[in-house]
Amino acid sequence: MTVSARFSEIAPLLEGQAIEVPSWAYGNSGTRFKVFGSPGTPRTVHEKIADAATVHRFTGLAPSVSLHIPWDLVDDFGALRTYAEGLGVALGTINSNTFQDDDYKLGALTHTDKAVRQKAIDHHLACVDVMDATGSRDLKIWLAEGTNYPGQGDLRGRQDRLAESLATIYERIGDDQRLVLEYKFFEPAFYHTDVPDWGTSYAHVSALGEKAFVCLDTGHHAPGTNIEFIVAQLIRLGKLGSFDFNSRFYADDDLIVGAADPYQLFRILYECIRGGAFGPDSDVAYMLDQCHNIEKKIPGQIRSVLNVQEMTARALLVDRDALTQAQEDGDVLLANEIFMDAFYTDVRADLAAWREGRGLPANPMRAFLDSGYQEQIEADRVGGTQAGWN
Ligand code: PSV
Ligand code: MN
Ligand code: MN
């Protein structure tokens, strides 16, 4: 197999593509109705990392794994780092968790009770301690905070307390570290959410300083939202820190990225490329935030990173000079045609040939399924408690 001439022009840009995978994608998850167990599910963080390393081994795309504290708590994070590196992956973003503790029922960083706020702040400071040991750059904060009923909370007072809590956490962020604040338009709170949109996240991270950025989770927007516009705007403002990629049909569905709307993924990646947020000079972290409720988890992750790679290749194929010319000429239909031409280009055969040339399987999914890894973990991982959304 050989790659086409046009593809070989863009192929070098695919070389360093890295998509971080979340540890929780390997554990069991479900809906509020049922969490399904599945054979071979990791019982420890070490087993999650081993599965993540397997995704990287077959795809060459996922060199780091993101951890969630306390789900992935261990006594010795330095040793965990060494273990991960031994498997060929790094430990990446550290995610805090203030959504599973009774004390946080009415808020954590926004709570009216100073003692509760301090507890939530201390948890984040402990997460930074973890980052120091793992060598992680980013602390990712997603807050499940908000209210269910008008009048329940003082909207403005909650923002003030949030700003104050975040500032305390930010003080502890090291010179080589960053704080990324994720937004989500609703859920678990249903009336108002304290960080519901990119504007609110942007306001907070701007106030914090240059080590604070916005995290954009593709599943966290109202239907019909033009996400690529938000991407373009945050890149313009220098505040796009990271992506949590997933697909949504209805709300925060956490489905395989590119499954629901590959064209939207293409448009998002195009804005990243257009904005200089893709490639070796970019600091934007590309991560998955997905759960695999009914499908097998490792193949689910393999499919996800391959989807990102495929849409990246297509977005790189946009003839930007011709597009700029058409835009400047006001040629609406030609501009759209140039854009769509790239989107409709089937890059799968070229990608397969290119992978082979780099010593990777042409078809990572098939190679994984044929490898026996899944059967092995299903046989080995019996007993103990399966990891999950716990
Ligand atoms: C909850 O919505 C959520 O899916 C957020 O997107 C976080 O990034 C993730 O959980 C992990 O905390
Ligand atoms: Mn997320
Ligand atoms: Mn989410």
Image (cartoon, rainbow, N blue to C red):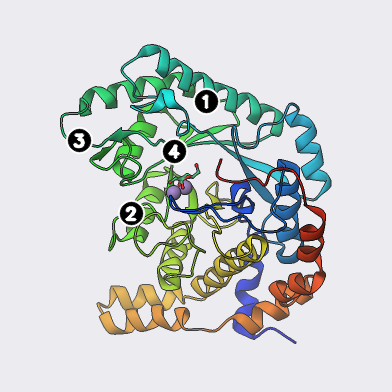
Cα distance in 3D space between marks 1 and 3: 28 Å
Q: Residue at x 42, y 56 (%)?
A: 218
**Looking at the image, is mark 3 or mark 4 earlier in the sequence?**
4
**Looking at the image, is mark 1 or mark 3 earlier in the sequence?**
1
Badge 1: few (under 14), some or many (20 or more) residues near its Cα, within 10 Å?
many
The answer to whether the residues at label 1 and label 2 have Cβ atoms under 8 Å apart is: no
* Front residue of this view, candidates 153 and 333: 153
**SS class of the residue under badge 4?**
loop
**SS class of the residue under badge 2?**
loop
Mark number displayed over residue 354: none
Q: Which residue is mark 2?
A: 221
* Front residue of this view, candidates 181 and 28: 28
Q: Residue at x 35, y 76 (%)?
A: 325
The quadrant holding residue 312 is bottom right
Q: Amino acid at mark 4?
A: Trp
Residue 70 position in % (x across, y down): 59, 32
Q: Is mark 4 within 8 Å of ligand 1?
A: yes
Badge 4: few (under 14), some or many (20 or more) residues near its Cα, within 10 Å?
some
**SS class of the residue under badge 3?**
loop
Looking at the image, is 103 positioned above or below residue 68?
A: above
Q: Which residue is mark 3?
A: 149
Q: Which residue is mark 1?
A: 124
Q: Which residue is mark 4?
A: 142
Q: Is residue 331 visible?
A: no
Q: Amino acid at mark 3?
A: Tyr
**Looking at the image, is mark 1 or mark 4 earlier in the sequence?**
1
